[in-house]
Image (tube, rainbow, N blue to C red):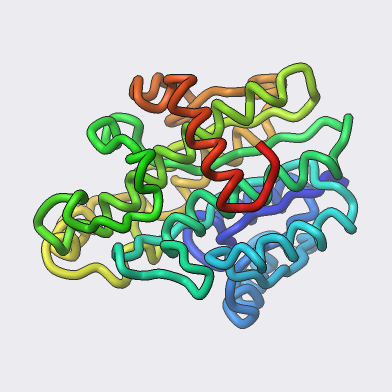
C-alpha cells in the first residue's frame, strides 16, 4: 500500500488532501501541532472514508528541532511514496520563535526545505512524489523574496498599512516555496523523485487568517464568503500526488491541474541558488 505524508493535516486543505489520498487507498500520515486536532481530523476522515489507514505525527513545524525529529521518525518508518507539504501560517513580522526565526519563515519555507531534503536519502532510488502547496503565481508576482532579509527583520520594508505586513511576509514565503521547488527539482533530476508546486486557490475555512487585524482582516472578510471550501483546494495537490498524467513530471507549478509560469524573480537560477544556500545555513544542512 502506498504511503503518504501530509503536513498541516489537522484541518482545512491539509485534511482534505489527506482524505483524498486515503480514499485512493494510501496509508496517510497526518502531521500537525495538536494531538487533539489531529485525532478529530482522523475521525472526520474515517467517517467519510471508512477503513482509511491513518497515522498521526505531532510536530510543531515552526521549530526546526521538531522538524528534524519528525524527519528522523519518518525515515525510520517505511519510506513515503508521497509527501505533501501543506502547513502554512500568516504571522506578523515580530513573531519570532525560541530559535530566533520568524514563525512564518520556518513553518512555510524552512520546514519543507528541511523535511523534504531529509527524506530524499531514506527514499533512495525508489519512486516518490513531493508536492509543495504554494499560492497564486499571479498574486505573488509583485512580492519578490528579499534575499537579504528572509527573516523579515525590517517590518517597514513590508510596506503599509502595517496591518497588511503579515500577508506580505507570508507572500514572500510562498514565493520561497516556488523557488525551492525549482532548485530541488534540478538536484533530483535523473532520480525517481519528482517535486512540483501547486496553488490550491483562494479557499475559505483554512484558518490562515485567524489572527488577522485591520486591513488584512477586512480583506479576508470580503473574500471569504465568495471562496470555495477546502475540498476544492485539495484537488490539484491530490492530482499531482496520484495521477498518471503527473507521473514523471517535475520542477513545474500547477493551478487547477494546468502548468502555469511563475514570476521571473522565482525562476532566476541565481536567486534560487542564493535562497537554497541561505536556507541550508539556517537549517544546518550542507549546501
Residue 189: image x %, image y %? 71, 19
Place of residue 179 in the rendered image (x, y in percent of width and height, measured from the top left): 48, 32
At x 40%, y 19%, the residue is 261
Left or right of 59 in this view: 148: left
Left or right for 190, reference 271: right
x, y percent for residue 258: 47, 22
Query: Does 235 sit above or below residue 210?
Result: above
Q: Is 76 situated left or right of 6 in this image?
A: right
- Relative depth, front residue between 190 and 237: 190
- Residue 234 drawn above or below residue 162: above
User: Which quadrant of the figure contains the C terminus?
Assistant: top right
Residue drawn at 55 percent across, 36 percent down: 276
Residue at the (84%, 40%) spot, across then down = 123
Q: Nearer the viewer, residue 15 or 35?
A: 35
The residue nearer to you, when weighing 23 against 124, is 124
The answer to whether 279 is drawn above or below residue 276 in the figure is below
Q: For the image shown, how many numbered marks are present on the structure?
A: 0
Check the image and name the residue furthest to the bottom: 36
Q: Provide residue 95's location: percent of width, then percent of height.
A: 36, 70
Q: Which residue is painted at 71% across and 60% down in the image?
A: 68
Q: Is residue 232 above or below residue 10?
A: above
Amino acid at each position: 500500500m502506498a504511503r503518504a505524508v501530509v503536513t498541516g493535516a489537522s484541518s482545512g486543505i491539509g485534511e482534505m488532501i489527506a482524505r483524498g489520498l486515503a480514499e485512493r487507498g494510501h496509508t496517510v500520515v497526518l502531521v500537525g501541532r495538536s494531538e487533539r486536532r489531529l485525532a478529530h481530523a482522523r475521525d472526520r476522515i474515517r467517517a467519510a472514508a471508512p477503513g482509511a489507514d491513518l497515522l498521526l505525527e505531532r510536530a510543531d513545524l515552526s521549530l526546526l528541532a521538531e522538524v528534524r525529529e519528525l524527519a528522523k521518525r519518518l525515515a525510520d518508518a517505511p519510506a513515503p511514496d508521497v509527501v505533501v507539504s501543506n502547513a502554512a501560517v500568516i504571522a506578523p513580522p515580530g513573531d519570532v520563535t525560541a530559535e530566533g526565526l520568524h514563525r512564518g519563515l520556518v513553518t512555510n519555507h524552512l520546514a519543507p526545505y528541511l523535511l523534504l531534503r531529509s527524506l530524499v536519502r531514506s527514499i533512495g532510488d525508489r519512486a516518490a512524489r513531493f508536492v509543495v502547496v504554494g499560492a497564486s503565481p499571479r498574486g505573488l508576482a509583485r512580492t519578490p523574496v528579499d534575499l537579504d532579509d528572509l527573516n523579515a527583520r525590517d517590518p517597514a520594508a513590508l510596506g503599509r498599512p502595517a496591518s497588511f505586513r503579515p500577508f506580505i511576509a507570508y507572500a514572500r514565503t510562498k514565493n520561497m516555496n516556488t523557488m525551492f521547488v525549482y532548485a530541488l527539482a534540478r538536484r533530483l533530476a535523473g532520480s525517481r523523485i519528482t517535486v512540483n508546486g501547486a496553488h490550491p486557490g483562494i479557499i475559505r475555512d483554512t484558518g490562515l487568517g485567524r489572527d488577522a487585524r485591520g486591513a488584512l482582516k477586512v480583506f479576508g472578510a470580503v473574500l471569504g464568503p465568495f471562496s470555495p471550501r477546502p475540498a476544492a483546494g485539495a484537488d490539484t495537490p491530490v492530482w499531482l500526488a496520484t495521477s498518471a498524467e503527473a507521473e514523471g513530471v517535475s520542477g513545474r507549478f500547477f493551478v487547477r491541474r494546468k502548468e502555469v509560469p511563475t514570476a521571473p524573480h522565482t525562476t532566476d537560477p541565481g536567486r534560487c541558488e542564493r535562497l537554497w544556500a541561505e536556507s541550508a545555513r539556517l537549517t544546518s544542512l550542507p549546501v
